[in-house]
Image (spheres, helix red, strand yellow):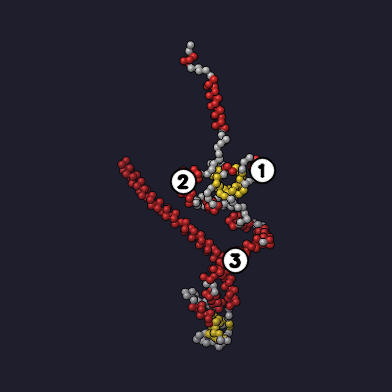
Amino acid sequence: MNAMKHATDSAGSQTGRAARPFRAAMLRGLGVLVPPLLTIVIFLLVGQTVKQYVLDPVTSWVREGLVYSLADIRYDLGPIDPAAKTATVDGLVYRQVEGDAFIPLVVYDTVRRTLGTRTAPRSAEEYYRSYVETTYLRPYIVVPVFLLLFVLVLYLLGKFLAAGIGRAFWRAFEQLIVRLPLIRSVYSAVKQFSDFFFNETEVQFRKVVAIEYPRRGIWSLAFVVSEGFLDVRAAANEPIVAVFVPSSPMPMTGFTISLPKRDVIDLNITIDQAIQFMVSCGVVVPPYEIQRDWRKVPLAEMPELPSPEGVRSESGADADEGDEQAEGETEGEPDQSPERAAP
């Protein structure tokens, strides 16, 4: 019975060992495939959102404007060629499309030629919409023009808001928004997020550091923002730095604290890499930080620690004083061993 159980356990362990390489290969393949797929998905989502809520409405407005300006629709023309359903006015041939409506034959032929598998338009307005789309609003024309106009609008909007009247107008608009009960909460959160990434007038971080916060033994990333207050430096009698400790996964919120400069460790990463680390909750780490083993880092590259000179713990000092007192007492006392005490 024990032999059968041992054989079963051995077979199960061998199966587990055989499954481990397969699982490791699958995880390794996912690790290679997921980053580019997620990048493509994010760009597709952004592009689809811009197309659905910006490009399509703008294209629709432009199409309706062109239809309104180009439409040449005639009614009750005669005489009519019954076979071709055409009529000629001032040398221009018109084609009957629905009821008594006539459109230029050029427009009719262009739409029919580029119709493909789509359903044929019924009204004269639909014919002109199809004509405008196939003639003036082709994708290879619309997309570059839209991008150029979009960049131009952003530039002009930024210049306008940077001016005095634009800033006053925007401030009045924001005051109106913050008075709305439900919208102000969403708007405030979105504004903090956008200001953190796009507003250059906000606090400029100097470098990325690591501090022991909120207690000793727990290391947190922080951004050095200033040298701190003079009164705090005078009270501490040493250099002080003010750092911003962001929260994950929303690094635009956090805490600003002041602490001694000797308790700050400079990190060899950029601000963008630190933000990526925080937004991803520690998943996205700079590649060289993943490959580097701290036990193999040369001493010259190790972070500079505070000098231990003059810093002694009270327990260590008390222990040294106790040892000195014990040595003094030993030297001053006579030897009370039984052998010497005997007469």
Q: Quadrant of residue 328?
A: top right
Who is closer to the viewer here, 17 or 146? 146
Residue 63 versus residue 232: which sits nearer the camera? 232
> What residue did someone put label 2 on?
293
Residue 259 x/y as whole percent: 60, 43
Q: Which residue type carries mark 1?
A: Asp
Between 46 and 343, the one nearer to me in the picture: 343
First in sequence, mark 2 or 3: give its number.
3
| Mark found first going from the N terminus, 3 or 1 | 3
Whether residue 247 is visible:
no
Residue at 31% across / 41% down in the picture? Answer: 3
- Type of the residue with mark 3: Leu
Task: Look at the numbered disc 2 and give the secondary structure of its residue.
Answer: loop
Q: Residue at x 63, y 46 (%)?
A: 228
Residue 4 at x, y percent in the picture: 31, 43
Q: Secondary structure at mark 1?
A: helix
- Residue count near mark 3 (Cα–Cα under 10 Å), binned few <14, some 14–19, many ≥20: few
Image position of 73 with respect to 306: above or below: below
Query: Residue 194, how many percent across, how many down?
Result: 59, 57
Residue at screen point 62% across, 64% down: 156
Q: Which mark is residue 122?
A: none
Q: Disc 3 designates what residue?
A: 152
